[in-house]
Image (cartoon, rainbow, N blue to C red):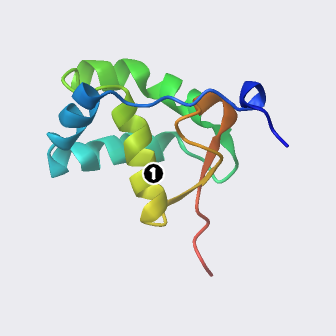
Amino acid sequence: MTTAEEQPESYEPSAEEIAQMRGATSDEALAVDKLILRECLPHWRKVAMVVAKLFNEFESTFAHLPLAYIQARMQELEDAGAVEIAGDVWAMRHSEIRLVEPRK
């Protein structure tokens, strides 16, 4: 049995961050999705690595959106079948992401 101390730390977006994310346009969502997919590979990468690689560009382009928006979009991309996530995307250092291999 896993104790609470052994659980990876998971981030919970604040109500303000959630409101900011809900205010994002569909064009902004698509642009962030493109950034994420550009950094994903067919093999597993830490979510924290992908977020770190996107940080500067995201901050300069989408300063009005919280960084947590990247993780929210990762979940949407997984729901759409574009990526696969192992673990909890909100526990960045303890989760991984990869592109879904196209079916042949």
**Image position of 23 with respect to 99: above or below:** above
Horizontal arrangement in the rendering, residue 19 relative to residue 86 (left or right): left
Q: Nearer the viewer, residue 83 or 9?
A: 9
Q: In x, y percent, where is residue 24?
A: 17, 41
Quadrant holding the N terminus: top right
Q: Secondary structure at mark 1?
A: helix
Tell me the residue at 17%/51% (across/down). Answer: 26
Q: Residue furthest right?
A: 1
Q: Residue furthest bottom?
A: 104
Q: Nearer the viewer, residue 93 or 63?
A: 93
Q: In x, y percent, where is residue 84?
A: 59, 57
Amino acid type at image mark 1: Gln
Q: In x, y percent, where is residue 23?
A: 14, 39
- Name the residue that disc number 1 marks: 75
Horizontal arrangement in the rendering, residue 39 relative to residue 98 (left or right): left
Q: Nearer the viewer, residue 32 or 89?
A: 89
Tell me the residue at 45%/63% (across/down). Answer: 79
Tell me the residue at 50%/25% (across/down). Answer: 53
